Image (cartoon, rainbow, N blue to C red):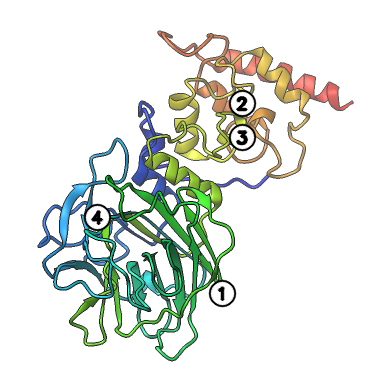
Amino acid sequence: MKRTVLVLGMALSLASAASADYAGAILNDGPVAYWRLDEVDVDAPLIEVTGNVAEGFFEDAGGLQVGGDGAIVGEAGTSVFFSDSFGFGCGGACGRGSVPVGGVLDITGDISLEAWFRIEPSQADVLPQGAFPRIFHYNNFEGGQYSFGVVGQNNAGYPDYNTVWASRGDGSGDATNLATSFTLAAEAETLSLDEVEPIWHHFVALISGNSTELYLNGQNLGDVFDADPVFWQAEQASIGARLQSDEVSLVQSFPGSIDELAVYDKLLTPEQILNHYNIGIGQGGEPCDINLDSVCDANDVDLLTGDDRTNWVVNLMNTYFGDSNLDGEFNSSDFVVVFSAGEYEDNIDGNSSWAEGDWNGDGDFDSTDFVVAFSNGGYELGPRGGVAAVPEPSSMFLSVIGGLLAMSQMRRR
């Protein structure tokens, strides 16, 4: 079994955390760019938190507001309000975040775009043909042109419904660009522009070649269909709006607030998407549930190596290296489990699990695992807790290993 090394970040290292950390979960899944949108001053730099993209800046045409309440439940982060005009332009009452073009954003392969949005227009404007308000917009005229956002009511052939969409193209206005969207019939009431209290939605767009999948609030929206071509006229990368071809006027402004925008050069898995959504609404799983199956067990520790494995075993599960059955104790019953599995020095690389004796995470069950287990202490001490001292492992280690090796040889005969 090949080991996968996961960097768990803050969510794993802080064993006492009551719930998972949203930023930690996002960073753990490897975005090439991530804007938390926590700025509290429109004149402050627009910060991309991975450090892969240089800082940007806000352009305020009179309607941009920073420091609004954030999308993530239980966290103190803020969001950015871009416009209350749900139209092609913004009438001088909008803004955008301007992001440097190039580098890691020049994605020509698989793309995942992720953000939280809240629609907040002052009135149910009817959008003109071709208006596709942007959450994120990218074009460098050479490769990596992509965009995603929302569409309002009565626009571009989508009467009476709101729509989320994603697109990629070659940056030419004459090109046939892929633009796919899904009409949210089931969500029409939820996304109504007449809501008294607009609510946050988690939106992920997966783009692979000419295929697009859209996820809203953790759920795959199903089949998508072609929308009108979406193309780009100015070389730019921006959040919440884009420039017109005059490179001065802001158009396609987003009608409301955006938070926690991330871009990936790969496709997120359905499990990762659902995990992000659940953490965002304050229902994140236990930090020890690495594979997101709602159970903290040996399958989770098998995904970890190094310090991550130590944190999981000692801090999250409060047990010992050597506790193969994860009952909170390291004792002879664990040896019965591992030797019954028959993996000890089986000469097959990488096929052993925690429950089969691989306690150091190298994929094999051999004498090095006993070194790790006994060096960390805990043998026959009962559940981890108020243990005042750990016995010296030297003589105990040798006697136990000798007996176990004899048992292994007898079993092979």
**Which residue is depicted at the point 29% across and 62% down?**
124
Of the two numbered discs 2 and 1 in the rendering, the one whose residue sits closer to the viewer: 1
C-alpha gap between disc 3 and disc 2: 20 Å
Of the two numbered discs 3 and 2 in the rendering, the one whose residue sits closer to the viewer: 3
Of the two numbered discs 2 and 4 in the rendering, the one whose residue sits closer to the viewer: 4
N-term mark: 3 or 2? 3
The kind of residue tagged 1 is Asn
Residue 24 spot, x, y in % from top left: 37, 44
Would you call the spot at circle 4 few (<14 residues within 10 Å), some (14-19), or many (20 or more)? Answer: many
The quadrant of the image that shows the N terminus is top right
The residue that mark 2 highlights is 370
Q: Is residue 341 left or right of residue 357?
A: right
C-alpha gap between disc 2 and disc 4: 48 Å
**Which residue is depicted at the point 29% across and 60% down?**
51
The residue that mark 3 highlights is 299
Residue 34 spot, x, y in % from top left: 33, 57
The kind of residue tagged 3 is Asn
Q: Secondary structure at mark 3?
A: helix
The residue that mark 4 highlights is 37
Residues under numbered marks 4 and 1 in contact, where contact means CB atoms less than 8 Å apart: no
